[in-house]
Image (spheres, rainbow, N blue to C red):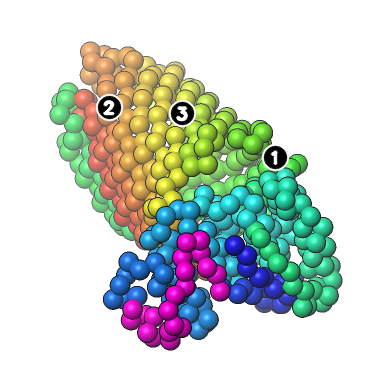
């Protein structure tokens, strides 16, 4: 397969020049002959509606939509085409979608599409260089260029051409006008450095029902607390490539929950973190994450915690990989005077996560197992726990992502609980279910809706509760 890319320079309401990529979409996917006379857009729309399972019609409709100026319609039709054909025939449509996204200035969405396993690694690597350079991320483009040559030696001769074009785009963009060349576009870690500030603003409804356990009866009634929720989460981070194999990141987060009807639930959370990722050979990635956070409720400090997590990921196959991780955390609580309630102490956790890419669904599915050990100064909160989880992330379209999660954990407390007169040990079963759907209007604006439920079933009624939360909101990226 071949296609022609024209590189030129343009200004896009920013103080620096970007590349625009103009693409010829006269592509013929492997095994798909473009037969029949050329039809008008309206005729193709009608035929595609009448025969939604005809892959050839979908591809021709995508091309016609793009030529008419309907970029979103073209992407939708290319996506539909990929759902109708075998994985080995999807590459031309994915490449076309990437090119359209670059033209539209939706560079993050283009980079996301380049992660799809159906693409040839060398082809994806070369398109990554073009995408990053088009976005004005020249440092990352140069790093991706080095990785491109390493991934596919056949592309090494193009390295000097790309390097010169990137230098011109950054330092002398006027000379780029009219430059053209053939591209046979792979996959690489982004390079250079970047920073971002995000605001997550949400409004919804929360309900809590406490005291539902069927075990030990305690002097407490079943209580219910319901309220609207106003949530604001602000994030800022900076990421830099330390060397060709290592990326370091630092960030901060402030989160605020307000419950107008139950002010005692109002909570503030503050987090600082640092990440280090190091690629080990071609198939392994090591990660280290350090965090510190505080939790305040109704204006009072409840917890100060520090944690460290080390992980190692093996990619056994292009479509599945495994992560093993160890976590250590220490919490310092504002404890009540009663000694059994003292929750200060360490937590040790082990995780094993298995992920699969499902190209036919546009999804990544992850199944996880974890084992937790908590030891506290008070006798009521020492426990050993086991948990199972299942999550999926599905890219339904270039703009829409759906996340689903479910899990269950079993927690066995080691000592007789003080609320039972030290006569009975506490055991909990915790179940959770969640869903989130997000739609990005631009790279910097996403709307979302989410639903989460947590059910804690304890043999001591005092510790049992159900929580339901429904939210809708907006994410802004600056």
Q: CA distance from mark 2 to mark 1?
A: 41 Å
Q: Which residue is mark 1?
A: 246
Query: In the visual, does 308 lie left or right of 208?
Result: right
Density class for disc 3 (Cα within 10 Å; few <14, some 14-19, many ≥20) is some
If you read the primary sequence from the N terminus, does the residue marked by circle 2 or circle 3 appear first? Answer: 3
Residue 436 position by quadrant = bottom left
Magenta stretch holds residue 29: yes
The C terminus lies in which quarter of the figure? Answer: bottom right
If you read the primary sequence from the N terminus, does the residue marked by circle 3 or circle 1 appear first? Answer: 1
Q: Looking at the magenta stretch, what is its main secondary structure?
A: loop
* Residue 316 position within the rendered picture, expressed as x and y whole percent measured from the top left: 52, 34
Residue at disc 3, secondary structure: strand
Between marks 2 and 3 in the image, the one whose residue lies nearer the viewer:
3
Q: Which residue is mark 2?
A: 428
What residue is rendered at 52% in x and 29% in y?
325
* Residue 200 position within the rendered picture, expressed as x and y whole percent measured from the top left: 48, 58
Density class for disc 1 (Cα within 10 Å; few <14, some 14-19, many ≥20) is some
Q: 431 or 390, which lies in front?
A: 390
Q: Which residue is mark 3?
A: 351
Per the rendered image, the range of residues in magenta is: 26-47
Q: 245 or 39, which lies in front?
A: 39
- The disc label shown at residue 429, or none: none
């Amino acid at each position: 397969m071949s296609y022609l890319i024209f590189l030129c320079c343009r200004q896009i309401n920013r103080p620096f020049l970007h590349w625009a990529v103009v693409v010829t979409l006269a592509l013929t996917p492997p095994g798909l002959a473009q037969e029949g006379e050329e039809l008008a857009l309206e005729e193709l729309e009608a035929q595609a509606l009448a025969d939604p399972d005809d892959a050839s019609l979908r591809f021709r409709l995508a091309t016609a939509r793009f030529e008419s100026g309907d970029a979103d319609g073209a992407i939708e039709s290319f996506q539909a085409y990929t759902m109708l054909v075998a994985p080995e025939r999807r590459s031309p449509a994915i490449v076309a979608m990437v090119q359209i996204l670059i033209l539209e200035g939706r560079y993050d969405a283009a980079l996301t599409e380049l992660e799809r396993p159906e693409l040839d690694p060398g082809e994806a690597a070369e398109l990554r260089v073009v995408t990053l350079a088009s976005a004005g991320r020249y440092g990352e483009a140069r790093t991706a260029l080095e990785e491109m040559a390493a991934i596919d030696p056949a592309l090494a001769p193009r390295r000097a051409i790309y390097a010169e074009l990137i230098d011109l785009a950054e330092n002398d963009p006027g000379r780029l006008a009219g430059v053209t060349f053939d591209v046979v576009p792979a996959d690489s870690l982004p390079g250079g450095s970047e920073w971002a500030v995000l605001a997550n603003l949400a409004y919804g409804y929360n309900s809590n029902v406490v005291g539902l356990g069927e075990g030990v009866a305690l002097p407490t009634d079943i209580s219910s607390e319901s309220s609207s929720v106003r949530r604001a989460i602000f994030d800022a981070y900076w990421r830099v490539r330390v060397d060709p194999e290592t990326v370091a990141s630092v960030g901060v987060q402030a989160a605020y929950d307000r419950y107008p009807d139950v002010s005692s639930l109002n909570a503030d959370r503050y987090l600082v973190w640092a990440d280090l990722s190091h690629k080990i050979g071609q198939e392994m990635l090591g990660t280290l994450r350090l965090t510190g956070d505080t939790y305040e409720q109704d204006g009072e400090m409840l917890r100060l915690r520090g944690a460290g997590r080390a992980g190692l990921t093996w990619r056994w196959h292009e479509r599945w990989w495994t992560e093993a991780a160890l976590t250590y955390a220490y919490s310092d609580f504002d404890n009540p005077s009663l000694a059994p309630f003292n929750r200060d102490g360490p937590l040790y956790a082990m995780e094993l996560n298995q992920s699969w890419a499902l190209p036919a669904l546009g999804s990544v599915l992850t199944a996880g197992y974890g084992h937790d050990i908590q030891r506290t100064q008070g006798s009521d909160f020492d426990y050993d726990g086991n948990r199972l989880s299942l999550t999926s992330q599905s890219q339904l379209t270039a703009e829409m992502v759906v996340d689903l999660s479910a899990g269950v954990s079993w927690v066995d407390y080691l000592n007789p609980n003080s609320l039972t007169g030290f006569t009975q040990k506490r055991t909990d079963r915790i179940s959770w279910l969640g869903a989130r759907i997000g739609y990005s209007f631009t790279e910097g604006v996403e709307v979302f809706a989410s639903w989460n439920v947590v059910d804690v079933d304890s043999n001591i009624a005092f510790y049992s509760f159900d929580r339901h939360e429904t939210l809708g909101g907006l994410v802004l990226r600056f």
